[in-house]
Image (cartoon, helix red, strand yellow):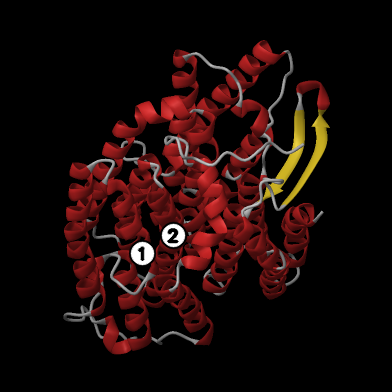
Amino acid sequence: MILVWLLGILGFGAVATWAVGLRSPTAARWTTLGLLTAGLILTLSCWSETAAWSAVRPTASYWVRELNWPWIPALGIHFYLALDGLTLILIVLTLGIGILSVLASWTEITTHVGAFHACMLWVLTAILGVFLAQDLFLFYFSWELMLVPMYFLIVIWGHEHRVHAAIKYFIFTQAGGLLMLVSIVALAFLHQRATGELSFNYFDLRHTPLSAAAEWWIMLGFFVGFGVKLPVVGLHTWMPEAYAEAPTAGSVILAGLLLKTTSVYGFLRFALPLFPNAGATIAPAAMILGVIGIIYGAWMSFGQTNLKRLVAYTSVSHLGFVLLGIYADTILALQGVILQTVCHALATGGLFVLAGIIRERTGHRHLDHLGGLVTEMPRLGAAGMILIMAAIALPGLGNFVGEFLILAGTYNVNLPLTIIATAGQITAMTYALRLMQRVFHGPMPRKWRILDLNVRETAVFVVLIAFLVWIGLRPQPIINLAQPALDHLKTFESEAIIYPEPS
């Protein structure tokens, strides 16, 4: 029942937060913070159990915890939730980023505060549902549920061009989601034709016999659905606007959780294991798209004048590494994908918090109106320097380990793409140096008289940087926790470890 409680605390707690916010905005903030903290404590209570389970690599059970209730039996739909090491890492990340988002936007949101925090909680509930669902109907339900509250977060509390950004976000993600729905229904019907039983169960569908053509087209629906939210270059055009126009908390959740993390999980948990042959066929093209994204994202970042759009395009670049590692499909590359996913969420989330603080203090987010801030805000300058170092994967920080493992795992699969991806880091250096110079150094366009980070804001950056350093120096605990799932997901090679289905 711990998995149900986890969803219930956030989902039903959002209603209480909204009600409390009608009377006291401050009470709504504290209620949200308390609910997320309670969920994090509940999740961390499973950490030692999951670590012990991952250490022995059990063959008797695929999941650490699972719950399977009939939901719509006539259609073979179950309320099926399950937890393993990979899921636990992403849930802890989700709740942690959620807490930091609340703290970062403590004074930014002044209107409809209760509704704002209720939408945040509903988004986070849907994200947890995506990670826990092992019934593809429940997975799609949670996937689409993320869309609605995030749309309102952008369109109500966003910046100047929020309506256009929100509509574009809605259209792109809804179109990708509908393609994935068609693929899910087609897969379920083909399973029924082959077995006589209609089911959306993950394990049942993994054993569905498919022709090469059917597997290819169904896989393509999943690829586009996940690719829109990653985003894969070419499907990314909605993303810079949504990132730039969302409020700080919305940008952090979008960049750290809603898009990258859920889509990476979708590729790893569903797209690769369900369609191993089609996945192996599309792998070279997907890896090329990843490398194009690395170069393109870095190049576009260099040309941006809007601080949040600049950070948004860095995500396109760094997530190119993730796509490259996913379809390299070696153990080293997949380990790097997990570390890069976690560390990029922390580093990019921190940069969006930084951008939100700068806008709140100065009223600007364009580089032409900024400069010399390190004089007035030395603590923010120090935090920004470390986060930028993490974003370009300098040694000693978690992003370096993630990208190094991805490149090492890709080396024997495709050497030319590995070389090009490595060279892409040179372009990343240029936008990083430009960002640091234009925002914190150089002449001040006006005589700023602004306050440096307060205790709450300092705590947010200290936590983010501490985890980036810890993962950079000691990544093995996260790798060990996710390793059983990664062994199971490494589908393109014959030595992949296959666990038995749960009884």
Q: Is residue 342 left or right of residue 80?
A: left
Q: Earlier in the sequence, mark 1 or mark 2?
A: 2
Query: Which residue is nearer to you in this view: 502 or 417?
Result: 502
Quadrant for the C terminus in the image = top right
Few, some or many residues within 10 Å of mark 2 (<14, 14–19, 20+): many
> How busy is the neighbourhood of tag 1: few (under 14 within 10 Å), some, or many (20 plus)?
many
* Towards the viewer: 95 or 328: 328
Tell me residue 453's x, y (percent). 44, 84
Where residue 365 sits in the image (x, y, percent)? 33, 66
**Residue 43's x, y, as percent?**
69, 63
Question: Going 17% across and 60% down the picture, which residue do you hit?
Answer: 426
Q: Secondary structure at mark 2?
A: helix
Q: Amino acid at mark 1?
A: Val
Asked if the residues shown at circle 1 and circle 2 are in contact, with their CB atoms under 8 angstroms apart, the answer is: yes
Q: Nearer the viewer, residue 310 or 362?
A: 310
The residue that mark 1 highlights is 401
Residue indicated by mark 2 = 339
Asked if 498 appears above or below 484 in the picture, the reply is: above
Q: Residue at x 50, y 22 (%)?
A: 218
Give the spatial CA distance, label 1 vs label 2.
7 Å
Residue 233, by quadrant, is top left
| 369 and 498: which is toward the camera | 498
Residue type for callout 2: Leu
Badge 1 marks a residue whose secondary structure is helix
Please tell me whether residue 134 is drawn above or below residue 407 in the rendered image: above
